[in-house]
Image (cartoon, coloured by chain):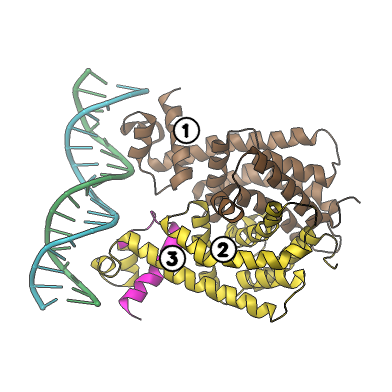
Chain colours: A yellow, B brown, C cyan, D green
Amino acid sequence: MSTREKILNTAEALFAEKGYEGVSVRDITGKAGCNVASVNYHFGSKKGLYREVFLVKMAERSRKLQSLFWKKIGDSANPPPEQIIRSLSEAFLRSPFSEKERMIHHKLMAREAERPSEVFDEFHKKVLMPFFRSLFLMLEPHMPRRIKREQKMLYLMSIFAQIIHFNLARTMITKVTGQTYDERYIDDLIEHIVRFSLKGICGGDGRK
Amino acid sequence: MSTREKILNTAEALFAEKGYEGVSVRDITGKAGCNVASVNYHFGSKKGLYREVFLVKMAERSRKLQSLFWKKIGDSANPPPEQIIRSLSEAFLRSPFSEKERMIHHKLMAREAERPSEVFDEFHKKVLMPFFRSLFLMLEPHMPRRIKREQKMLYLMSIFAQIIHFNLARTMITKVTGQTYDERYIDDLIEHIVRFSLKGICGGDGRK
DNA sequence: GTCTATAGCAGGATAGAC
DNA sequence: GTCTATCCTGCTATAGAC
């Protein structure tokens, strides 16, 4: 792996773990096994490195997650809502990355959702928004008819709220439930999100 | 207001906005209008100040939120699930604080949920856990019968996931939905959380 | 209790050898 | 491209006058 890549990988792990300000260039280069100057050589500045982490690593992973989702959906033009929600939950809670990488992804994403940096606007427009839009179009026919379009959007947000939260607030959840966060438990989580959200959106058991 | 209080208030606003590492003692004392040494005089260290912010300001607000919730519930021994969810959403999304203070509270809380500091354990045991427990006891009878206790706990987590997320990811939500985050919209949010979660928990319209 | 002054160190960034 | 050495700024914390 090139120095550039090593820095990129180390940096995103540390940024996710401790936040941008919580990490120094020396932390990164130290852990990556190269000298302090290399960050400035390759990325211009610490800020430039963060930007690159987001626009390269995060965007790449997002595209992978999205294509995994579409693979689960298959080529059905009109998939049942249960399949949509389950595919979404599985894509974001289980695969195709290591659990460490999944955490990195969600932590960085949540941080940007909460306090967007300059990079986020571009990322949002190019990567997130198109995906949200097609999800919404698939789910919208299954929602209650009478409510407004803006309120319908919230149904989608509620699903993501759970996915993000169950990925992030892991420490709190294990404290509250007393469960360990293993593969077995993640299956339970997915099952729960599907059951809860399906009823939440469609009411009843989700069948029309 | 005493210097001590001014520091405490300024500090929590800044910690919430930029995170612990993103804020310097100079930022805090500068904005609070006192000298740099005052933090060390009153709180021993920057860490001690953070600790105090959490154990005093956060705990205080949490107790207020919880007692507000109980007031909304009234003295009914067995309130209907809709009332529980609505009271919860209203307590955490609307009142009794300014919108700025509500954001402070949720940002600090989310940060601790994600990456707990030394203070959090104590806070969790004393403030959060008892509240979760009584909420669970009230909601549990309305949940599907067949599932395990640990999975039932997740129903409660799903409600909090939404409350936290709709408070925090405001920037993203306004971007996605195109809505402004005013009082009117918050009413919509509460209405949505109640509708979605009630169906999610009980299925159907929530009536037994 | 509040201030100034300063110690002592860690931060990001750069220059220049190799 | 990679390294060391170094600059300078800004950090936390403390000493000591008032």
Name the amino acid type tagged 1.
Asn
- Rendering coords of residue A153 (x, y %): 67, 56
Q: CA distance from mark 2 to mark 3?
A: 16 Å
Q: Which mark is residue A54?
A: 3
* Residue A97 visible, this orientation: no
Chief SS of the magenta region = helix
Image height check: is A185 above or below C11? below
For the point 33% across and 38% down, the residue is B26
Name the amino acid type tagged 2.
Met
Marks 2 and 3 in Cβ contact (< 8 Å): no
Q: CA distance from mark 1 to mark 2?
A: 37 Å
Between A151 and B152, the residue placed more toward the observer is: A151
SS state under label 2: helix
Neighbours of disc 2 within 10 Å: few (<14), some (14-19), many (20+): some
Question: Which chain hosts label 3?
Answer: A
Front tag of 1 and 3: 3
Q: CA distance from mark 1 to mark 3?
A: 33 Å
The residue indicated by pointer 1 is: B9
* Residue A103 inside the magenta-drawn segment: no
Front tag of 2 and 3: 2
Q: Are marks 2 and 3 on the same chain?
A: yes
For the point 74% across and 68% down, the residue is A191
Q: Magenta region: which residues?
A: A1-25
How many discs appear? 3
The residue indicated by pointer 2 is: A129
Neighbours of disc 1 within 10 Å: few (<14), some (14-19), many (20+): some
Question: Which chain hosts label 1?
Answer: B
